[in-house]
Image (cartoon, helix red, strand yellow):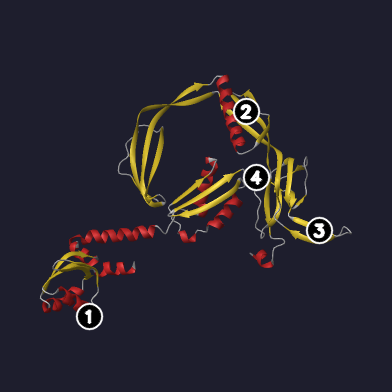
């Protein structure tokens, strides 16, 4: 591979020699250590490849053997530059473009968050871009393992998270509301604690010492399974103490307050005419809009679609354009009937319950009531759930001294 690259850089030719003494010419070439390759015999001589500089060295041998040479093909960078010397500006621009693409590839220009709950994913995306990895961060400064740990600490609803850095894209994969998984790392110790106030309905201990039991009422932060294991002797005295990462499945009933309302008198939008569109170009934080059509009113909905420039699937660039569509509207006063408002509240409540059930939460009781007051219908009450309530609270107790310092 290196030899092919060197031949291309210095240039080489495909040549045909013919005449009175082809064998004598080839002997002189070999004796004087001129490199030729892919030699083929012809009726009058030979065809071969040789370096560009070897042509001048062969001239005395051609005269001595009364041979002639014909250049069939010129290959390599020197011939390419000679052929395209009138296009030097194009070549320089291409090289500058390549250098710019390489420089831009050293930064992060896109952050993606994937999760079951789009609202949670969007909130995490905003926090990442604002506090941890703003767009334009140098990739070498991003520690995916450290970022995963920081996000777990900030967002309690995340049970599993993984960060991947590929191209110019940072992708964060997450799951919410899953039972804590057993941690097999022997360098981690800690207790399973309650994530919220609950009444324990099911408890299976796999590792550690149970502190609570079924039917116990626990508060948020209470230890349910301790990571401290005591070994007793025959006199029932503590002989040895060991520390592990407590592990088990703990479910409990929790109560969530629910409140929602619908105003019976409301305003609906009536859209006027066709949407007006314009284009905005952007580079990083700088925007340029060539023309903005006048709306004639201050009331309009605006929909913006961002088109980001990218070379490949995971190679985004910090520029592109935004397609903005604006539609004018007027507000029209309207009234819900009590039946319509009640149906709307029930649909919202069922959507909430369905989202909980999709996360593996069992609905024990639905104590939400719908009442009318002050010109609106209000849904208010509690939802009693049966769900996993434990999370591992890590500790450095029991680790070697050097680990505790870390």
Which residue is most to the front?
Answer: 43
Local secondary structure at mark 2? strand
Disc 4 vs disc 2: Cβ atoms closer than 8 Å? no
- In the rendered structure, find residue 179 and report the number of the disc placed on it: 4
Numbered marks: total:
4
Q: Position of residue 370 (x, y in %)?
A: 63, 25
The residue singled out by tag 2 in the image is 379
- In the rendered structure, find residue 231 and report the number of the disc placed on it: 3
Compared to residue 113, the image places residue 21 above or below, namely below
Q: Is residue 284 visible in this depiction of the protein?
A: no
Q: Position of residue 235 (x, y in %)?
A: 89, 59
Q: Relative to residue 142, is residue 277 drawn left or right?
A: left
Give the mark, 1 or 4, whose residue is nearer the N terminus: 1
Local secondary structure at mark 1? helix
Q: Quadrant of residue 217?
A: top right
Q: Separation of disc 1 and disc 2 at Cα? A: 100 Å
């Amino acid at each position: 591979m290196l030899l092919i690259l060197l031949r291309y850089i210095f240039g080489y030719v495909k040549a045909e020699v013919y005449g009175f003494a082809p064998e004598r010419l080839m002997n002189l070439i070999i004796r004087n250590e001129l490199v030729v390759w892919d030699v083929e015999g012809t009726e009058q001589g030979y065809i071969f490849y040789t370096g560009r500089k070897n042509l001048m060295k062969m001239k005395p041998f051609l005269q001595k053997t009364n041979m002639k040479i014909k250049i069939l093909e010129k290959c390599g960078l020197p011939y390419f530059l000679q052929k395209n010397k009138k296009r030097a500006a194009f070549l320089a621009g291409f090289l500058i473009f390549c250098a710019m693409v390489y420089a831009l590839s050293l930064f992060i220009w896109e952050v993606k968050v994937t999760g079951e709950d789009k609202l949670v994913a969007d909130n995490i995306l905003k926090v990442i871009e604002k506090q941890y990895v703003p767009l334009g961060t140098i990739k070498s400064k991003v520690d995916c393992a450290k970022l995963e740990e920081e996000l777990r600490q900030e967002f309690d609803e995340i049970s599993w998270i993984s960060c991947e850095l590929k191209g110019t894209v940072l992708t964060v994969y997450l799951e919410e509301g899953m039972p804590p998984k057993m941690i097999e790392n022997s360098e981690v110790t800690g207790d399973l604690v309650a994530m919220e106030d609950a009444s324990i309905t099911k408890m299976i201990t796999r590792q550690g010492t149970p502190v609570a039991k079924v039917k116990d009422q626990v508060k948020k932060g209470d230890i349910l399974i301790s990571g401290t294991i005591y070994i007793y002797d025959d006199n029932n005295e503590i002989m040895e103490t060991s520390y592990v990462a407590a592990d088990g499945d703990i479910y409990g009933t929790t109560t969530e307050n629910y409140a929602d309302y619908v105003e019976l008198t409301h305003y609906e939008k009536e859209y006027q005419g066709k949407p007006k569109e314009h284009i905005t170009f952007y580079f990083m934080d700088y925007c340029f809009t060539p023309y903005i059509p006048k709306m004639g009113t201050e009331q309009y909905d605006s929909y913006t679609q961002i088109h980001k420039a990218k070379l490949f699937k995971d190679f985004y660039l910090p520029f592109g354009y935004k397609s903005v569509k604006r539609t004018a509207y007027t507000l029209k006063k309207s009234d819900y009937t009590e039946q319509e408002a009640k149906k709307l509240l029930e649909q919202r409540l069922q959507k909430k319950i369905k989202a909980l059930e999709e996360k593996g939460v069992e609905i024990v009781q639905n104590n939400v009531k719908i009442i009318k007051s002050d010109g609106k219908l209000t849904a208010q009450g509690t939802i009693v759930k049966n769900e996993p309530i434990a999370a591992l609270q890590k500790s450095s107790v029991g680790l070697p001294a050097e680990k505790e310092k870390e």
